[in-house]
Amino acid sequence: ETGVTQSPTHLIKTRGQQVTLRCSSQSGHNTVSWYQQALGQGPQFIFQYYREEENGRGNFPPRFSGLQFPNYSSELNVNALELDDSALYLCASSLGASGTGTDTQYFGPGTRLTVL
Amino acid sequence: AQSVAQPEDQVNVAEGNPLTVKCTYSVSGNPYLFWYVQYPNRGLQFLLKYITGDNLVKGSYGFEAEFNKSQTSFHLKKPSALVSDSALYFCAVRDGEAAGNKLTFGGGTRVLVKP
């Protein structure tokens, strides 16, 4: 196991609701990335946080937002949920967004979100 | 822009036979390449990465991958497959000259190792 934890494991919401997913980084890691993995697809990059600042964003609308805390844990917030938001949400931590990109990202087990 | 293609949705192999999972990539700058494996209802587990240096990279659980710059490929290999290797495998790339640490993943290849 990687030491990256996510909560909750599963979540069921209805359209229009808001959801918050949580992630605790591996010890010593100061960078967190979030990915969305729809059924049967590869993970898609949502955004990354480095030392509490957003450090890159994928093609996701503004209703996807995040936070990183001083202890480097992180939250992913999704507002106005849509049916297509149903997916496995993965959090990954790495040692540092030094810009070299050589750091390995270590993934948590994910949160399975179902939107009805 | 960066992209990854995994041309095979599924690979079937008999236990003890060699396993190859194909991956090709496209980046503007230098490629940083990664392989991950995903078991059912689990997150992604890191297998190996290529950053620079020797084109043959050795990783966890007996896996290795060969970087081929001219063919823009990074195929994953294992000399002798085990039934426990049955899982979903993802290749990922990062553009070494782009800001941030975004990984772009392929669509995945399901490996089925039969006894």
Image (cartoon, coloured by chain):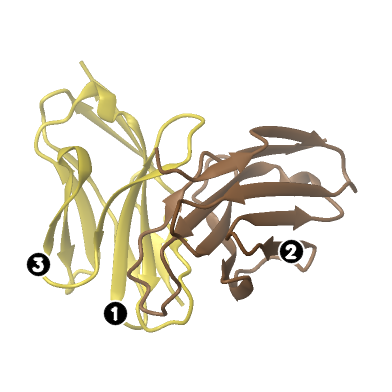
Look at discs 1 and 2 and give the one toward the viewer.
Answer: 2
Residue B90 placement (x, y as % from top left): 37, 49
Q: How would you rate the neighbour count of disc 3 (Cα within 10 Å): few for under 14, some for 14-19, many for 20 or more?
A: few
The one of A2 and A13 positioned closer to us in this rendering: A2
Residue B51 placement (x, y as % from top left): 24, 69
Q: Chain of mark 1?
A: B
Is residue A23 visible to the viewer in this orientation of the structure? yes
- For the residues labelled 1 and 3, the Cα–Cα distance comes to 15 Å
Q: Are marks 3 and 2 on the same chain?
A: no
Badge 3 amino acid: Asp
Q: Quadrant of the C terminus of chain B?
A: top left
Name above or below for residue B67 compared with residue B48.
below
- Helix, strand or loop status at disc 1: loop
Residue B33 placement (x, y as % from top left): 30, 64
- For the residues labelled 1 and 2, the Cα–Cα distance comes to 30 Å
Q: Colour of chain A?
A: brown
Name above or below for residue B69 compared with residue A84.
below
- What's the mark number on residue B54? 3
Residue A37 placement (x, y as % from top left): 57, 47
Q: Residue at x 63, y 70 (%)?
A: A52
- For the residues labelled 3 and 2, the Cα–Cα distance comes to 40 Å
According to the picture, the residue beneath numbered tag 2 turns out to be A65
Q: Residue at x 80, y 63 (%)?
A: A63
- Quarter location, residue B19: top left
